[in-house]
Image (spheres, rainbow, N blue to C red):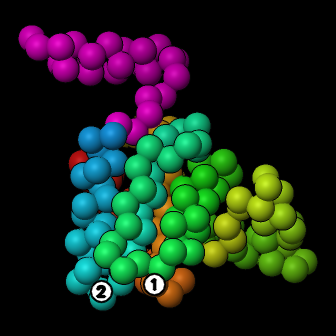
Amino acid sequence: MDEQEIRSIVDQVTRELGGSPRNITLSEAQTLSSAVHAKAKEMGVKAVVAVSNRAAQPPILVECADDSYIASYDVAVQKAFTVVSLKMSTSELKPLAQPGGPLYGIQFTNQGKIVIFGGGEPLCDKQGNIIGGLGVSGGSEEQDTALAAYGKKFFENL
């Protein structure tokens, strides 16, 4: 048994005994980002992909496609922060944050880091614990939402 297998067993036993969920690893984040960038390229989107751990700050990975929008950097990072902080996708948050919604105005909290439009997805382990967040920016809201959903699905199948 190598060190990786031992760590995996210890992590699994700790979670089963009610320990803290793990964080997404840098290696997992890199694999996820590569997959999202490949899909974005197919779609013609110059995306910025940000991945945070379950603490939400700082991001553990941010990768920018060549010639991506400068503004997309902060938006992607803040989407990754939002989904971990509020334990829901930014698409789910959107209707709740509209005028008359129960979370109207939430985008003005947390030093303005809360994003209320699509492109962010929480990343969960097999037990449903949030272990990270994915933020994608660079396309339209629909494109960012589709890329983040693709990334979440890809991560679930890792």
Q: Position of residue 31 (x, y in %)?
A: 24, 52
Report which residue position mark 2 lands on. 43
Closer to the camera, 30 or 23?
30
Question: Does residue 150 appear left or right of residue 117 in this picture?
Answer: left
In the picture, residue 3 is in which quadrant? top left
Q: Magenta stretch containing residue 91, yes or no?
A: no
Determine whether 15 is above or below 57 in the image.
above
Q: Amino acid at mark 2?
A: Met
Query: Which residues, given as a range, are shown in magenta?
Result: 1-25
User: CA gap, disc 2 to disc 1?
Assistant: 9 Å
Determine whether 12 is above or below 112 in the image.
above
Q: Position of residue 129 (x, y in %)?
A: 50, 38
Closer to the camera, 75 or 42?
75
Count how many numbered circles sit on residues in the image: 2
In the picture, residue 5 is in which quadrant? top left
Q: Secondary structure at mark 2?
A: helix
Q: Is residue 120 visible?
A: no
Report which residue position mark 1 lands on. 139
Q: Secondary structure at mark 1?
A: loop
